Image (cartoon, rainbow, N blue to C red):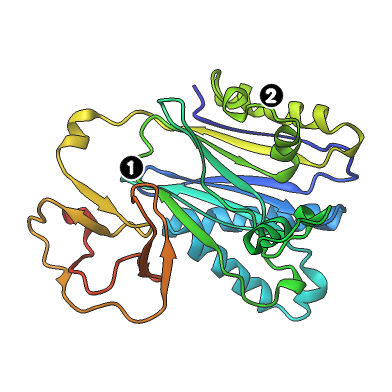
Amino acid sequence: MLTHAADQLIGSCSDQCDATATRATDGGGRAYVLLDGIGSSPKVRAWTRAQARRLADLTARSLQPNEAITQVQREITAQPGWQDEAPGACAVVAVTGPDQLLRVAWVGDCRAYVLYPDGRLQRLTTDHNGRTTFEAAGWPVPRGARHIVTRCLAHPEGGERVEPEWTAVHDRSGVRLLLASDGCYEPIEDAARDLKAELGGGAPADRAAHLVALAVRLAGERADNATCLVVDFPAADPAAAASTSRVLCAHGYVLEQNSCPGCDAAEDAPHPADPVRVHPAWAPRPLTRCRTCGQPSRRRVHKAAEAA
């Protein structure tokens, strides 16, 4: 039985410029990528598909989706004339490794959701668009603001640098992951349909096909490219889960554990500057952590997660 599946419909656009890609990792996990290309043309379609494959390759190797997005941006902007050649895309990337951590990074307004075994639906991402900007400032949101992307991969108006956001689900055991383009989730959201009910039940392939068909039907003549990727993660072995108590940052380093037998990689030196404020799924409040590894400063660091 397939544990992940993607589906898409073209809507009323001239070309299908959303793209998905997956890659297996060396540690038995998998990288999942969904891109929403800006514009609608054969050029945008080909470019978006190529970048989705590149992102999947990099993420599968590093297990760090935020670093993969940054690397792809560097590669694009290193090309002469990239401002004219790179159409741009919103991106959401998720990856699993040998631990139970689910890492997610994104730029733009593609979204990631997780449906937990107890029925809770959690949205992991925040939209990088005009609507979010106006709402954060407490201003009235102009019509169409949600279609103004404020952060994305490669688009020349975004400049040469792009800062992906990232988060992590500490325990992915038994959860269902949804990656979706705005053409998939917006019509469902606008119609006040219960996404939890639409996503739950059935196999990933059934749910992916259902969601994109529902989105296109609800949007009618205004239907955009609708794409989603649905992933089911198996429940963890309780015996294995009880054998160690540890919390990992989004880079896979150990933050807390009961013991560290055989670990000689501990160090007391605080991290360099460049902190970032994040709110991991397992933390009761936002935390200030090192942007490079996710560790809090001035804390004893156990870098060898595999040694625990």
Residue drawn at the location 65% of the way across and 64% of the way down: 137
User: Can residue 64 be spotted in the picture?
Assistant: yes
* Label placed on residue 223: none
10 Å neighbourhood of mark 1: few (<14), some, or many (≥20)?
many
Q: Quadrant of residue 70?
A: bottom right
Q: Nearer the viewer, residue 222 or 90?
A: 222
Which three-letter amino acid code belongs to the residue tagged 2? His
Residue 31 vs residue 169: left or right?
right
Are circles 2 and 1 on residues that touch, CB within 8 Å?
A: no
Image coordinates of residue 305 in percent, x first then y, are 23, 56
Residue at which label 2 appears: 210
Q: Nearer the viewer, residue 21 or 111?
A: 111
Residue 76 vs residue 234: left or right?
right
Residue drawn at the location 79% of the way across and 52% of the way down: 45
Which three-letter amino acid code belongs to the residue tagged 1? Gln
Residue at which label 1 appears: 100
10 Å neighbourhood of mark 2: few (<14), some, or many (≥20)?
some
Q: Is residue 105 above or below residue 98?
A: below
Image coordinates of residue 110 in percent, x first then y, are 65, 49
Image coordinates of residue 200 in percent, x first then y, are 55, 23
Q: Secondary structure at mark 2?
A: helix
Residue drawn at the location 64% of the way across and 45% of the way down: 20
